[in-house]
Image (spheres, helix red, strand yellow):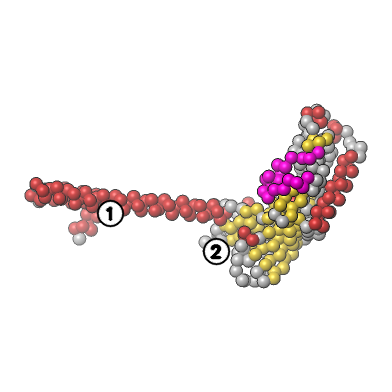
Amino acid sequence: GAIASLLDKHESRVDLLLDSMLTYLKKTQPSYFEGEEESLASRTIADVLKRVSSDAASESTASEENRLAASLAISEMTTPKELKVTVSPSAQQALERAAAKKAEQIASPGASETDIPLGTKCSHNGCEVCFAGPSTYEASACVYHTGTPVFHEGLKFWSCCNKVKVTDFGDFLNIKGCCTGRHEFSTKDETMAQKRECRSDFFQQGATVSFNIYAKLADPTKCSFTLRRRPSDGGGEPEYVLSFHVHFEGEYDFKRTIVLAGPVDIDTCLVDILQPKIEIKLKKADGRGWNSIGEVVEEDDLEMD
């Protein structure tokens, strides 16, 4: 009872309790602290205080490590992962025909330079120069690719210079053009792509779910497909979120964010761009059947911790 009372008085701080007990013993039992006994008592009390401090420090370190581990787990959970994209040969040929048709249109007599909106990007593939007035043509030469992007078996390259092949999308965008010429700018502001809905459906076979987006001439350099996990609002199993942006037919955008109907193995999911559609292949993480692809949500509605 006396010890409990002392603990309450010192707010359960064992080190403070021992210090009070030491002061009390020195007053009531002074003989115990004389000669060799004093050294023994001091060492005993000091050893206890050292252990208490060490245990407190260990608990603090463990608590900090647990906090950091939890923080890293949440960060890894909510970080979107870009899905691997492959373009089929038929889709590749369709893109090349569309690019050739566009080149013919650019080569034909166009509107006056005064009709070109400032900031319009050069129409040539791989050129990042934007129109800043008539002097833009003389300020720099246009270094561009005459071909189309090719995504095949994990490799990314341009059809016009296929000796340079990379796996990273950022490295692909940095591949230097193989042709030099004059910049070409369209009078149409291509940065203002029109939003258009695309028909979609899904089917499942065993552990695989295929989600189809019916969009023709999807440009792989302007499309993105990501998957991520996020903590559920109810504190249960994490949710799996699919987000995609499809740029197709040279002027349309289709975007969606979907909380999937079940868990998936993110590392094995991939995307195939085909001629009539885009197929997103999802690998289930369990054997449960899906009644739907999931719930379409607004990206802003998803709270990122």
Q: Which mark is residue 237?
A: 2
Q: Position of residue 293 (x, y in %)?
A: 68, 64
Q: Give whichever of 124, 160 is nearer the camera.
A: 160
**Is residue 60 left or right of 137 when viewed as pictured?**
left
**Is residue 281 left or right of 69 when viewed as pictured?**
right
Residue reaching furthest to the left: 31
**Is residue 299 left or right of 20 when viewed as pictured?**
right
Q: Inspect this view and state whether residue 283 appears.
A: yes
Q: Give whichever of 298, 17 is nearer the camera.
A: 17
Q: Secondary structure at mark 2?
A: loop
Quadrant location of residue 137? Answer: top right
Q: Position of residue 228 (x, y in %)?
A: 61, 56
Q: Residue at x 75, y 46 (%)?
A: 163
Q: Amino acid at mark 2?
A: Glu
Magenta span has 169? Answer: yes
Q: Residue at x 10, y 48 (%)?
A: 36
Q: CA distance from mark 1 to mark 2?
A: 38 Å
Q: Residue at x 18, y 49 (%)?
A: 43
Q: Residue at x 27, y 52 (%)?
A: 51
Magenta span has 25? Answer: no
Q: Secondary structure at mark 1?
A: loop
Q: Position of residue 303 (x, y in %)?
A: 58, 53
Quadrant location of residue 259? Answer: bottom right
**Magenta region:** 161-179
**Of the two numbered discs 1 and 2 in the rendering, the one whose residue sits closer to the viewer:** 2
How many residues crowd around disc 2 within 10 Å: few (fewer than 14), some, or many (20 or more)? Answer: few
How many residues crowd around disc 1 within 10 Å: few (fewer than 14), some, or many (20 or more)? Answer: few
Q: Position of residue 32 (x, y in %)?
A: 10, 51
Q: Which mark is residue 12?
A: 1
**Is residue 174 left or right of 91 when viewed as pictured?**
left
